[in-house]
Image (cartoon, grey):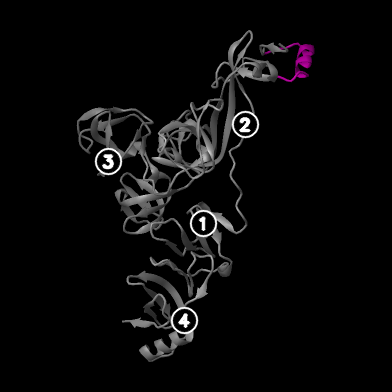
Amino acid sequence: MRISFLVFLSLNTSVWSFAAEIPALSFYRNQQSLFPSGQASREDLEEKVLRRDYELWLRVSWNKKTYEIPGETVIRDVQVTKNLISKESLDLLKDPQETSSRITTVSANTTLQVLHTNSYWAELLETKTKLRGWAPLHLLEAPAEDQGVFITLIDTFLRKTPQDSSGIITTVPRLQRLTPLGIEKSYLKVSYQGHIGYLDLANLTGRADFAMWAYHQNKGWLGISHRENEYLFTVDNQKIPLQGFLAFNPYVSRGVVCQKLKEEAPSIRSRVEIANNKAHRWTLSLLEGHGSVWWRMDEPTISYKPLAENQITSEQLLKREVSAVAFAAKSIKGLVSANGIFRTEDGKIWKEIALFEGKNFPVAIHPDGIWYVGNYRSFDEGKSFETYIKWDKLAEQIQFSLHKTPRHLRITQIDPISHSRLQILIDTGTQKIKMRAHILSHEWTLVK
């Protein structure tokens, strides 16, 4: 053994000088130790490795301040889904440890059922083979159409009826995954340990708490501000019952605090913005003369691919002044007008369409699959555009119908309507008029 010694408060200068020349790593009795128990060479620590583990730490912002907090104190969107999709080919491991044996390998874009999560790992079920195993959360993503589960943020009473005065059946501990059976007033109906009861929604977190966009069964995709109990508030301040939403597209950088460690740390239930993820890689080794000890290896930052110059995230987009948004039916593919026209494939990353650089035009997506931007339309989901209005014919039609010559013609709104028809609102300079036409026709009629 090359070197192993305790760290004392005062050391002889010559001894310290000698020790500093020998490569050594600090080791700890456990991962929560504030101070190291000693030092040893990497070779000695690697000689008898018992296991390797990861501990996630997050740099978050809350109340205009920045904090470094353990990942276990925060819930993220990938932890409140029923299913997750593999971003790449990955191994399912027997235990949530890097050195654990492989159960099976799943290919990219495989949908896996979520059984359990912690801050770094997810226990998953491969539904075809019925094999289960663990994989790192950062290699997985949530499907938008997953309505998810709810997780208890604190110990919570399970009540007989959805009201504060109701009798208590039992207490549901914090961090329990619960499948919703319905929402009544401000309570979630659930089944827990054979009991059907109600939990206060204020003590739970679910997919709606992370939503940037949410799909409503009647209103389509909407930009979301926040949740208050059984209601979602949109960015334009609509108050809509949560039960009408069928899919969610999340802020990937949002977290909900589930544990308060220090007085100055973010409070339980607080929404925090995650600026950085860092995984501390710990190894448990059997060290001669000391027994089992923990030591920390490298600290890899979980990074994401940088965006191209003409791309922005949904979070960046919603900080702009958004003049119009349109999503394809039952899809998160869409268009937005926000000092430039942007299209998205996944609701997370938006690519600016060069043809409309810096412009604001009305946008719409017809159920028949045609995408509209101002007086342009696209048959390939926004990859290419052509004009669909013959302005001279439209001007003649307006002059004939209104018996006056329009000062100018500008489309201010586009509305898809039934039977493959389109309605547009046009500003003529003196008034606004509605015109309708079949989606493949240039013959417009005035709507009186």
Mark 2 residue element = loop
In the image, taking residue 304 as reference, residue 425 lies left or right, namely left
Q: Which residues are magenta?
A: 9-24
Q: For the residues carrying marks 2 and 1, which lies nearer the camera in this image?
A: 2
Task: Of the two numbered discs 4 and 2 on the same chain, state the one appearing first in sequence.
Answer: 2
Neighbor class of circle 2 (other Cα within 10 Å; few <14, some 14-19, many 20+) is some
Against 230, is 193 above or below? Answer: above
Amino acid type of the residue that numbered disc 3 sits on in the rendered structure = Leu
Alpha carbon distance from label 1 to label 3: 34 Å
Q: CA distance from mark 2 to mark 3?
A: 41 Å
Q: Quadrant of the C terminus?
A: bottom left
- Do tag 2 and tag 1 residues touch (Cβ < 8 Å)? no
Label 4 secondary element: loop
* Distance (Cα) linking label 3 and label 4: 52 Å
The amino acid marked with disc number 4 is Leu
Whole-percent x and y of residue 33? 56, 19
Amino acid carrying label 2: it is: Glu
Q: Rounded to the nearest whole Å, what is the CA distance between mark 2 and mark 1? A: 32 Å
> Which residue in the protein does label 2 denote?
299
Q: Which numbered disc, 3 or 4, marks the residue that appears first in the sequence?
A: 3
Binning the other alpha carbons within 10 Å of mark 4 as few (below 14), some (14 to 19) or many (20 upward) gives some
What residue is pinned by disc 4? 409
Task: Look at discs 3 and 4 and give the one toward the viewer.
Answer: 3
Nearest to N terminus: mark 1 or mark 3: 3
Q: Is residue 171 above or below residue 128?
A: above
- Identified at 24% across, 29% down, the residue is 194
The one of 434 and 368 positioned closer to us in this rendering: 368
Q: Is 245 one of the magenta-colored residues?
A: no
Between discs 2 and 1, the one toward the N terminus: 2
Q: Position of residue 16 (x, y in %)?
A: 76, 15
Residue that sits furthest to the top in the current view:
289
Residue carrying label 3: 181
